[in-house]
Amino acid sequence: DRKIEYDNKVATLSTIINKNQKDREVELEERHREAIQRIESMKETWAKHQESVNQAIKMICDKHTIDYVDKVPFKGAPDNTIKLCDEFIIFDAKSPASDDLQNFPNYIKLQTESVKKYIKEESVHNSIFLVIPSNTVQVIETFSYNMGDYNVYIVTLDVLEPLILTLKKIEDYKFVNELA
């Protein structure tokens, strides 16, 4: 009887261990699926931000008869470029890679240095604008960077129209001065 009872308890224990292992595998698989889903969601959010910036700038350009440049005549492929005063003004959409915004300011700082490649090109305005989502503003401490031979400004989507119109006004003033 003891032998049978022992065998039954060992079998029960084996069943419990197997069930725990299967449950653990299912749990790990679920976590992995959630992590992949979160990454895909962030990529989708970034793509939506980039697309909304693109659409907003195109709409502003159409509304105010400003040249939107689809393909720049220089090396590189900035997200959005407009042409004012015979200069290319670059608007690059930037979005955090995850929900954790702790590293976003460092990412933005790195991006201010990486846009230098555009400044080296002829007819590129010495101010570049990085367009960030409005919900990330609270983690950004510096909104303008003087990089020596160029400046980088951090702006949000809702600032684009007044900003572009201000840049257009500068073009209008230069045109009036040339006529005088």
Image: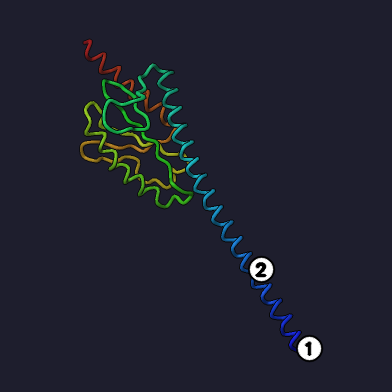
Picture coordinates of residue 3, whole percent (x, y): 74, 87
Q: Quadrant of the N terminus?
A: bottom right
| The disc label shown at residue 19, or none | 2
Picture coordinates of residue 169, whole percent (x, y): 33, 20
Q: Amino acid at mark 2?
A: Lys
Q: Nearer the viewer, mark 1 or mark 2?
A: 1
Residue at image position (40%, 26%) is: 162
Q: Amino acid at mark 1?
A: Asp
Residue at image position (69%, 80%) is: 10
| 55 relative to 29, above or below | above
Residue at image position (34%, 33%) is: 78
Question: Disc 1 to disc 2, how far (Cα)?
Answer: 27 Å
Picture coordinates of residue 14, whole percent (x, y): 66, 75
Q: Is residue 104 left or right of residue 18?
A: left
| The disc label shown at residue 122, or none | none
Name the residue beneath numbered marker 1.
1
Query: In which image quadrant can residue 76 be found?
Result: top left
Query: In which image quadrant can residue 171 be found?
Result: top left
Structural crowding at the residue carrying mark 1, measured as other residues with C-alpha within 10 Å and reported as few (<14), some (14–19) or many (≥20)? few
* Closer to the camera in the image, 87 or 77: 77
Query: Which residue is situated farthest in the bottom direction here?
Result: 2
Of label 1 and label 2, which has the lower sequence position? 1
* Mark 1, secondary structure of its residue: loop
